[in-house]
Amino acid sequence: MNRRCFLRGTAAVGAVGTAGLAGCLERLGFEEQSAWANPPLVEDRPDAVYLPASREEMGMYGMATDGDYAAMLTYTFPHRFWIVSGGKELVEVDADDSLHLMFSLWDRETGTVLPVNTRLEILQDGSPVDIGVSSLWPMLSQRMGFHYGDNVRLPDEGEYTARIQAGPVALERTGAFDGRLGSRATLEIDFEYARSDINGLSFETIDESKRGSRDALPLMDHGGGGSGNSSSGGRPMGTGTPVDDLPGELLGTKRSGDAVLATLTSDAARFTDGGTYLAVCPRTPYNDLIVPFTTLSATVERDGSVVAEGALVETIDGEYGHHYGLAVDELAAGDRVTISVDTPPQVARHDGYETAFFEFEPVTYTV
């Protein structure tokens, strides 16, 4: 279904029902009331990941590389999302928004999605144009995974160049990333904006009986997946390596704030000099996406006394991928390891994630 036609007519022709709106509403005699409108928002949403009311198609503009970095530029309809920066703020669709512009950024050697500071500039005929934003928000989406996106305003249809500046990666880098990704990249992708491309994207509503259930939409997958990274047309989506495939000893996997927290130990020399390394991998349920830009801490208790504590460092590693780590003295059988999420992930959310990953309770594992 064409989303624009669906949205601008639902209020006026509710009795027709979704099935009756398969064609454009002009055929029914309805005029366009506004440029864009948000799809329905699930009522009585749980404080957890849930199945949203609709799903939308994504289009691709192109790819670019620069050194170790690769990027893909994509687009979809302008739509609401929630910014998380200390608090939570809803961003509504504006009538002047042209499209929801997105890009994904990853390491070319490993295919690992990179949480990193970025800037975006749009050029037309070599000159910058005002698009209403200077960077795209790091985001979590059930269909798109971890990416960067925002609603942007283009002055008119035509040819443009997206100039993405990314890096250096500020996370701790170990293993395959040691000594790499410490520079800034500039990636340029030429694209042509046409309103008909946006209007032609498909839009599906989810059955009302399923909306709001504790579930998630599947990630987009058009082939080209890589180890530990589902992809759309070869685009890494930010899924983590399956926990069972990670090296070291798994202390356990527990749920808090509706995130899945897997905690492992390792004695690998790149992490610690004779001690034990705690690696915590927060993931989304259902799609196993990484949860970046948060803060965690660990406390180790032995016989009722605290023997180690400290902040976990956000890290990317060739084997563990994205995780949070802390080196401690050797753990002993019976030690209690408590992991606390001190700051919720500071990433924007699409429908289905905006109520999750806020209220965390500490989780404890026994060695």
Image (spheres, grey):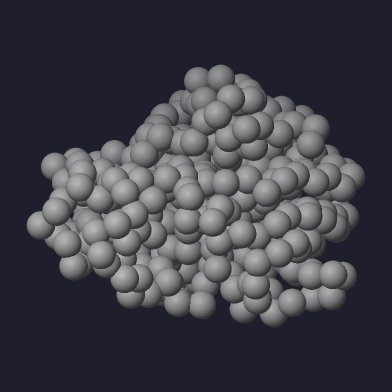
Q: Answer left or right for 242 relative to 235.
A: left
Q: Is residue 40 left or right of residue 163?
A: left
* x, y percent for residue 173: 76, 44
Position of residue 283 measured from the top left corner of the image (x, y, whole percent) = 47, 41
Residue at the spot 50% in from the left edge and 40% down from the top edge: 289
The one nearer the camera, 298 or 228, is 228
Q: Quadrant of the C terminus?
A: top left
Please tell me which residue lies in front, 219 or 310: 219
Figure check: 173 above or below 264: below
Q: Residue at x 41, y 68 (%)?
A: 36
Q: Residue, x 63% and y 25% (percent of image)?
A: 224
Query: What is the quadrant of residue 101 in the picture?
Result: bottom right
Nearer the observer, 240 or 211: 211
**Which residue is pictured at 69% across the width and 79% down the height?**
130
Q: Is residue 59 left or right of residue 167?
A: left
In this rendering, position of residue 116 left or right of residue 66? left
* In front of the other: 146 or 223: 223
Residue 20 percent coordinates (x, y): 20, 47
